[in-house]
Image: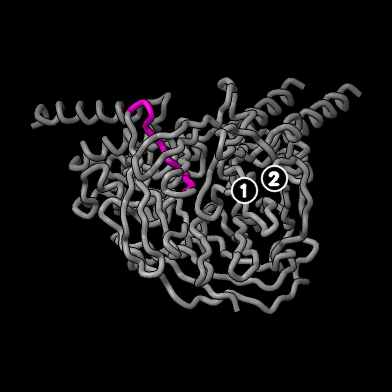
Amino acid sequence: MKKEISALVYVCLSFVIFISCNGNSVISIPNSKEGKLHGDKELVEYGEKVLTLDSVSAPKPIYMQIIQEGGEDVLTILNTYNSSVYFYNYDSGEFIKRVSFKQVRENEIRKPGAYYILNEDSVYILDMAKMNVSLLNLNTNNLLDIISLKGSEGRDWPNKLPQYNLFTANPIQDIGENIVLTGQLFWSVPSDVIKTFHFSAYINKKSGVVQFYHCYPEELYGQDANWEGGLQTTPYTTISPKGDIVVSYPPSHDIYLYSPYTNGYTKSYGGSNYAGTISSIGYSNKREIPKNMIYANFVQQDMYGPIIYDKYREVYYRIMTKKVADSQNNYSIQDKNIYIVIMDEEFHYIGETIIGNGKRWNINNTLVTKEGLNIEYISSENAEEEYIIFKVFKLK
Amino acid sequence: MKKTFIIYLLCIMYMCSSCINEEYQEREYLNDVLAEYPQLTKYSWLIIIPGAGCNGCIQESEYFLKKYVSEESLCFVLTNISSIKILQQKTSVKIKEHPNIYVDRDNVFLLPTNNSIYPCIAEVRNGIVVSVEFQSPQTSALHNLEESLLRRSEESPRRN
């Protein structure tokens, strides 16, 4: 009897250890329409844009914005190395000018991460190091305002307020009286803050006052599910023609619609015909989770990425990266094939196109122009980094 | 009963060590990768510089690259680099002119552990990685390497 009790104790202890290493509370999100979607639209590659770079600029810039000047499309590109924005005539590819936003020491922008050109007199620049937004007049290089994104929070502000990883295809948005920076948590969403953590910072253009809105959906990120690492907790945003914020979450086949200045949402199906069930990481010790397990969860599963509204063709493009079936130890996000789901304004599926993998395409630099959908192309012939190259896709 | 307990304890120790032995995992990973790159095994140290991660640590390793690029026992592996052009601007080092700089375009040297954000110094003996250290805010692997290089250069004349 004594032996049996001891054996039982060992079995129970082993079970506890096993659980602590391998986890529980896994959220699984099935794709109810996998293999059942039909559409007659596709994206067809039809041309390219090549911009010549100077000696201190490189391809794969972290941030770009298309603006209109004098009736023409102007592509602006952030150079973090020399803290400048470069302006190119998009149609001709001609370089127009470079504007530096270097400031005097105490106001120096240490690590520019994103910007929004309202006009050249009012440019908002996110400083990732200081976690603030500087408002500059680019023409005079005058600093007009510094807006803190940490507010009055203490050292533990990252647990209460978002951090930002913005790029061309997930940009700063302009909504009425505000510019909106959508950030995220870079670790799993704790249950006790899921209803209070707001990931979008609304900066009032007139007053500079910052207010935070929008919560993670509990059905995706609740139950203390393990979504460590920041890849799976990025809300990608675009603005609908009605002015709602449309959010694509990496693990969800749905898209979520948030009205400005609210915390509620509605949702609509917005998935890929080729995406399967997506699950959170089955490892409960979040602090000690090995990095390769986080990458494996992202690489070995289908995951959604940026969503972009095309005002010229009145469609949405939603990017999905397909799982790498047998990646073993070679966990590379660039190995994932890129699928682009095409939806109409009501989020009805109208088609889907596969363009190849991330070794050829930089989907972070995807933007819409009159010509079509532009995606940065990584060319092996551009080893000297002399150009930035876009392939332009037309909707057919 | 005592025997069973000891066996059980050993099992737990084994499970724990397999959970936490990151250093062993990193060495094994690099040895697997090096097996595919025999040309890099002739160096005594690999300095693996990631393109993204701990900014200050990476800047220190870039400074180290600039200072010691002509040191023949070192091989600098640039992994997950977003731009060689900008790195050359920052360091004033022409990558193509130095055979001991390897540009890892497929990111195979990017470690699959949480330390991948730090520059890694791997000591290689007889083609095998024998130790792995990181340049991080808490650890000064580059300083240690610099001291090893200085000791070596001081010892060299004595040998002659």
Residue A291 coordinates in the image, percent (x, y): 56, 41
Dot 2: chain letter: A
User: Considering the numbered disc 1 on the image, is that residue within a helix, a strand or a loop?
Assistant: strand
Q: Is residue A107 magenta?
A: yes
Name the residue rendered at 54%, 75% in the picture. A394
Q: Are marks 2 and 1 on the same chain?
A: yes
Q: Residue at point 41% right, 26% down? A: B137
Q: Does B78 sit left or right of A306 as displayed?
A: left
Where is residue B15 drawn, in percent x and y? Answer: 64, 33
> Which amino acid type is marked by label 1?
Ile
Q: Is residue B152 left or right of residue A367?
A: left
Q: Quadrant of the N terminus of chain A?
A: top right
Total labels: the figure holds 2
A393 in the magenta segment: no
Labels 2 and 1 touching (C-beta < 8 A): yes
Q: Residue at x 57, y 64 (%)?
A: A338
Residue on which disc 1 sits: A175
What is the span of residues highlighted in magenta in the rendered image? Answer: A105-117
Seen from the viewer's position, the closer of residues B122 and A49 is A49
Q: Against A223, is B40 above or below?
A: below
Residue A165 seen by the camera: yes
